[in-house]
Image (cartoon, coloured by chain):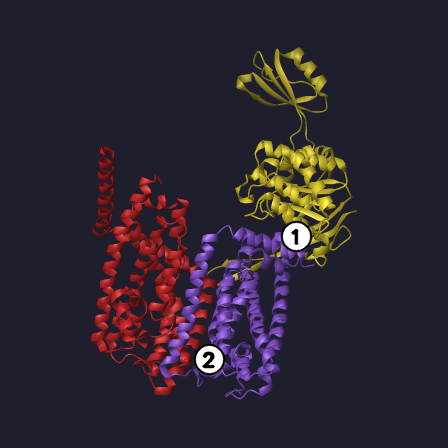
Chain colours: A red, B yellow, C purple
């Protein structure tokens, strides 16, 4: 039908427009815009003082608990799944610290904006929706790094014996891995948020994400505790270990520097896949919005 | 006296940031020595500018807020320690906060309230019937409260506040944000309530038309203190509000023309409209003199605007 | 006396069942989450076939008590955490204007019947645990078997109320309560021998978390506490729960008094 044909041309144009915007971002220094968005989010979180303190406190309490639990399991044979007690201590405390930085379970404002239609004003701005989302999340992560990361790690260091990296380069690799983990998590959460363009009530999708990310990322216990085949499936088939297990394994130098580099490469691979997927889904989502006359 | 307060006070500590890390705290008196007596069956208008202490006074009268000083007694009870006992004898409508159940149909909110206040079925049904007819609730009795318009919701709130037969009705800005028709409906209803005389009503409002149409007595509060307590006429007299005559002429007003007993306030439309303030003469005298002096086309006599008086009252502080 | 609260509850339930699809969804996911919690304990257990020096069936009993107590408390008074919203929007004033207790109004008004799913699952786990664990059955043990999960629920309920009460002073600090409620739920599923140092002394014994599942389980199994607490103390969980509940009620009343003196 000629009408459909025309419609497709128009939306093809819009898709190209969207992608041009992204390329335009990178090339014309509208990166400054994204930096501004990140900065704004950072400052916003600075005002949530009570919530930050409360969160850091919760992380610390959970740190004590998980630390004791894993240490008691390690007590019997002196190690758990190849981690010695010091590594387990580092794993738990740095893991609690990273929890708020990587932020799997953070508030989702985008679905609400889609539902109320406010997302239209976001789309009218000269910033790509996905880039804006990720930039804001990065600002938030930076704030969390200074507050929610520092507190549990400091407490843990004082109360327990950490395994400290034996090579200086590990710290750098750890930093890189954390940045990648934050980006991977942002991309995942963006995909979950995008389902709001199709589903009225995205709680189902959110719950799937919450359960899967919690279980598969090494939050409750280091993943190698699980049977080998399951661990392999998780690493290769899901992005979840990249969220927490990867940076932690890098930090405790599990398998040496070489293995750490492999983990980082895996995170990069997942980031590429998720960003690609994000753009495809976003294109479909925006097309749906336009078609519906939203 | 069904409501009695003596030197009622409420102080709040306000903390402000002074520089990066320090905080200064100052004590602000939201209500600063308010003494009121309200007799049973009276309808009292309680007005004041924003932040004057109206809502704070109301909260202290209803037991929501603990006073910092002074005494207060409502229906013979002290609101704060006797909150639940007092709650059965008063009805409260907050203009900006709903007391109804958001997700339930209006009718179910009413039924729930019957149980909450433990009212007998017959009494409840009688009062509900009365309110339904007076406030025209039938068309939206089964609509969930969250879907009601503001006017409909306000009518529902009024009903809800009266279903348990309270002796005192407190209304905090009940007409705020309402369209003209709803305002009329609410005012009509309140006028009925006042006329019956068995419920004492305390009404705080910004809308001075509410006062004019409903309350004989009004209390003006500003910066936590009572600046006037009396009838509307007394207010006009105290602040020397004057009546006005607005005349439309066939020829421009002659420059410098004066009339005894009146002063020229404004001359507009190139002299074709003039506003005279009556100073001592009656309207009849001024109109007669006016007709003799200039070609009159039309005229109207304007009563003193309560807004002007009150604005002057506020400004005077 | 109970009638107005019951009516509030029924009205709340009725307005909830409008959302029937999400009810089923919630049920499904709560099952998954309960399964995950259990799986975590089990996975850690399988590393050494023991946990904190206790055998699997003993640990399962402790898990079972906690698996009932926490969701039961969440079902009963979990909605009290909405206090934060009521205080922020000023709706708490409307609560104060009704001739009912503020606490029970809050509980009844936001009652969430969908939480019953996890209570049922927890009960199932508890029953299974009782069947498999080497319980030393006797009349006192039988009484404890019934009372201990209920006492645990009262304990968690008091924690929920106390945690929510903080909103009267610091609106956004609700998460602090999570450290104790959700943290407490995790913690009580494990034998206290797992924990050490000051942490154990403060949380397990000082704050009373050991009384929820660990000590009653020891009493049911006929073990003494390897950490040295006197044998009679193992039976005291109903008593300690009542004390904690009284403290929480007192704290709530203080919170309401503070709200009424400082306004919203």
Residue A156 vs residue B54, the one in the foreground: A156
Q: Residue at x 50, y 74 (%)?
A: C126
x then y, percent, for residue C260: 64, 58
Q: Residue at x 20, y 75 (%)?
A: A258
Instruction: Tell me: residue B90, above or below residue C77.
Output: above
Count the marks. Answer: 2
Q: Contact (CB < 8 A) between labels 1 and 2?
A: no
Picture quadrant of residue C245 = bottom right
Q: In front: C80, or B25?
A: C80
Task: Name the chain under label 2.
Answer: C
In which quadrant of the rendered image does the C terminus of chain B lie?
Answer: top right
Provide the chain ID for the residue under circle 1. C
| Residue C154 in picture, x, y percent from top left | 58, 70
Which sits in the foreground, C79 or B168? C79
Residue C84 in the image, given as x and y percentages of width and height: 53, 58
In the image: residue C129, left or right of residue B63: left
Residue B42 point in image, percent of width and height: 75, 40
Q: In the rendered view, does C32 fall on the left or right side of A233? A: right
Name the front one of labels 1 and 2. 2
Residue of label 2 = C59
Badge 1 or badge 2: first in the primary sequence: 2
In the rendered structure, find residue C97 and report the number of the disc placed on it.
Answer: 1
Outermost residue toward the front in this view: C131
For numbered disc 1, what is the local secondary structure? loop
Q: Could you tell me which secondary element the residue under label 2 belongs to?
A: helix
Q: Residues within 10 Å of mark 1 (few under 14, many from 20)?
A: many
In this rendering, the answer to whether B260 lies above or below C162 is above
Residue C144 visible in this rendered orientation of the protein = yes
């Amino acid at each position: 039908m000629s009408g459909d044909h025309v419609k497709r041309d128009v939306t093809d144009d819009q898709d190209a427009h969207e992608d041009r915007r992204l390329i335009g971002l990178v090339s014309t220094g509208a990166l400054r815009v994204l930096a501004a968005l990140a900065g704004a989010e950072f400052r916003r979180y600075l005002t949530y003082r009570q919530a930050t303190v409360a969160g850091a406190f919760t992380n610390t309490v959970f740190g004590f608990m998980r630390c004791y639990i894993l240490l008691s399991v390690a007590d019997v044979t002196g190690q758990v799944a190849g981690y010695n007690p010091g590594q387990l201590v580092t794993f738990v405390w740095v893991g609690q610290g990273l929890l708020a930085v990587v932020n799997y379970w953070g508030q989702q404002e985008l679905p609400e904006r889609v539902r109320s239609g406010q997302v239209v004003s976001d789309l009218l701005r000269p910033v790509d929706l996905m880039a804006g989302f990720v930039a804001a999340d990065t600002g938030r992560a930076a704030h969390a790094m200074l507050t929610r990361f520092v507190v549990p790690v400091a407490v843990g260091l004082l109360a327990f014996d950490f395994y400290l990296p034996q090579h200086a380069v590990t710290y750098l690799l750890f930093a890189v891995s954390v940045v990648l983990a934050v980006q991977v998590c942002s991309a995942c959460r963006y995909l979950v948020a995008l389902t709001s363009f199709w589903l009225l009530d995205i709680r189902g999708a959110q719950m799937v994400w919450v359960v899967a990310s919690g279980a598969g990322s090494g939050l409750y216990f280091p993943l190698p505790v699980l049977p080998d085949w399951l661990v392999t499936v998780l690493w290769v088939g899901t992005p979840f270990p990249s969220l927490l297990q990867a940076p932690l394994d890098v930090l405790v130098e599990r398998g040496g520097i070489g293995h750490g580099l492999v983990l980082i490469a895996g995170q990069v691979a997942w980031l590429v896949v998720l960003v690609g997927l994000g753009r495809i889904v976003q294109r479909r989502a925006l097309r749906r919005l336009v078609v519906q006359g939203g | 006296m069904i409501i009695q307060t003596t030197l009622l006070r409420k102080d709040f500590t306000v903390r402000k940031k002074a520089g990066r890390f320090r905080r200064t705290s100052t004590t602000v008196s939201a209500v600063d020595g308010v003494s009121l007596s309200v007799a049973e069956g009276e309808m009292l208008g309680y007005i004041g500018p924003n932040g004057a202490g109206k809502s704070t006074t109301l909260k202290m009268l209803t037991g929501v807020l603990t006073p910092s000083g002074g005494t207060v007694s409502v229906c013979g009870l002290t609101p704060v320690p006797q909150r639940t006992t007092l709650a059965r004898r008063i009805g409260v409508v907050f203009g900006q906060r709903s007391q109804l159940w958001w997700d339930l149909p209006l009718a179910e909110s009413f039924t729930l309230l019957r149980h909450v206040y433990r009212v007998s079925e017959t009494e409840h049904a009688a009062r509900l019937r009365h309110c339904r007819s007076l406030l025209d609730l039938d068309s939206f009795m089964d609509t969930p409260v969250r879907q009601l318009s503001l006017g409909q919701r306000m009518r529902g709130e009024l009903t809800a506040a009266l279903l348990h037969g309270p002796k005192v009705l407190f209304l905090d800005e009940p007409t705020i944000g309402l369209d003209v028709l709803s305002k009329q409906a609410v005012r009509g209803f309140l006028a009925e309530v006042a006329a019956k005389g068995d419920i004492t009503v305390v009404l705080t409002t910004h809308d001075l038309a509410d006062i004019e149409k409903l309350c004989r007595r009004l209390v003006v509060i500003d910066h936590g203190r009572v600046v006037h307590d009396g009838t509307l006429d007394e207010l006009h007299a105290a602040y020397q509000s004057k009546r006005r005559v607005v005349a439309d002429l066939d020829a421009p007003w002659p420059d410098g023309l004066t009339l005894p007993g009146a002063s020229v306030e404004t001359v507009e439309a190139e002299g074709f409209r003039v506003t005279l303030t009556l100073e001592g003469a009656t309207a009849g005298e001024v109109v007669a003199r006016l007709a003799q002096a200039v070609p009159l086309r039309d005229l109207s006599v304007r009563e003193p605007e309560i807004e002007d008086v009150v604005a002057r009252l506020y400004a005077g502080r | 006396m109970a009638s107005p609260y019951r009516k509030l509850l029924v009205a709340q339930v009725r307005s909830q069942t409008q959302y029937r699809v999400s009810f089923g969804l919630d049920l499904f996911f709560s099952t998954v989450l309960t399964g995950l919690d259990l799986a975590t304990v089990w996975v850690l257990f399988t590393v050494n076939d023991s946990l904190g020096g206790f055998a699997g069936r003993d640990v399962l009993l402790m898990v079972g008590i906690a698996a009932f107590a926490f969701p039961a408390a969440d079902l009963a008074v979990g909605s009290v955490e909405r206090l934060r919203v009521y205080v922020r929007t000023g709706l708490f004033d409307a609560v104060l204007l009704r001739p009912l207790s503020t606490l029970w109004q809050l509980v009844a008004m936001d009652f969430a019947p969908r939480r019953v799913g996890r209570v049922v699952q927890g009960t199932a786990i508890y029953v299974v645990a009782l069947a498999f664990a080497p319980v030393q059955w006797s009349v006192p043990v039988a009484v404890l078997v019934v009372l201990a999960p209920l006492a645990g629920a009262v304990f968690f309920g008091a924690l929920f109320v106390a945690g929510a009460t903080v909103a009267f002073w610091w609106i956004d600090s609700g998460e602090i309560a999570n450290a104790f409620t959700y943290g407490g739920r995790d913690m009580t599923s494990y034998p206290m021998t797992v924990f050490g140092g000051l942490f154990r002394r403060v949380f397990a014994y000082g704050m009373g978390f050991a009384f929820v599942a660990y000590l009653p389980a020891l009493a049911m199994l006929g073990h003494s506490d390897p950490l040295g607490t006197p044998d009679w103390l193992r039976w005291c969980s109903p008593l300690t729960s009542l004390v904690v509940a009284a403290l929480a009620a007192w704290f709530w009343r203080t919170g309401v008094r503070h709200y009424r003196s400082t306004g919203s």
